[in-house]
Each structure stands twice: as structure tokens, then as C-alpha cells.
Amino acid sequence: MVSIFVCSLLIFFTVHQFMSAIGRKCQVVNLDPANDRTAYPCALDVRDLVTLDEIMDENGLGPNGGVVYALEELEENIDWLQDELLKFDRKLLIFKKFHHHHDADY
């Protein structure tokens, strides 16, 4: 059984520290392609699929357009995300969320 916890950065970091301190296994999932400074280990990172800098450089996009493009890329590769998530067993998954205004269906 896998438990999932989705939260903002402050809560996220606190939950990760707490779980580590009490010896509970948890896996961090980063779905924010703009989050390039993580102070925690990511078991799964969207930046392994696509990076914001790469998107911006290759497509002449700014940060906002790059994030939208990254979400579309994630949506097109949803099988990759699903396959990676299925590798986790009996752990707490902590998702670092980010705010966006896009209708990608994921």
C-alpha cells in the first residue's frame, strides 16, 4: 500500500524532515520542472524527463511558457510517470506541488 501526501514547499520540507527523524520511509516526488534547488533527495523527479532550462532554450520560451510546455510534455509521457510511481511499494509518497493555470489532464 502506498500513501500519498501532496503539499506546498514549506509543509513538504517539514513532513520530509519529520518522517526521516522518526525513521519512517518516504519517497519524494518532484513534479515541478522549475524546482532546481532541492534540499532533499528526490526518488522521482520530473526533471529526469524534461528540464525547464532545456525547454526555454530550445523553444525560445520564458519561465511561464516553459512550465506550461513541461506540463504538456508530462501529459504526453504519462506512462513514464505511472511506470515510475508503480516502482514504489509500501511507502509514503510526498509530492511537491506547484500552482499553475493550465488544463492539462493529468
Image: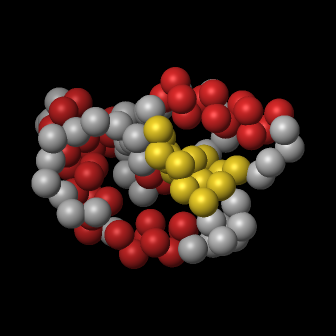
| Residue found 20% across the figure and 49% down from its top | 69
Q: Is residue 72 above or below residue 36?
A: below
- State whether residue 28 appears in this view: yes
Residue 26 on image: x %, y %:
70, 50
Type of colouring: secondary structure
Q: x, y percentage for residue 78?
A: 35, 69
Indicate the quadrant containing the N terminus: top left, top right, bottom left or bottom right: bottom right
Q: Is residue 58 left or right of residue 34?
A: left
Give residue 54's quadrant in the image.
top left
Image height of 75 relative to 24, above or below: below
Drawn side of residue 101 relative to residue 37, left or right: left
Q: Is residue 56 visible?
A: no
Q: Residue furthest right?
A: 23
Residue, x 55% and y 34% (percent of image)?
12
* Residue 96 position in % (x across, y down): 47, 40
The image position of residue 91, as x and y in percent, is: 70, 60
Q: Residue at x 83, y 33 (%)?
A: 21
The correct choice, above or below, for 75 with respect to 17 in the image is below
Q: Is residue 68 above or below residue 34?
A: below
Q: Is residue 89 left or right of residue 66?
A: right
- Image quadrant where one finds the C terminus: bottom left
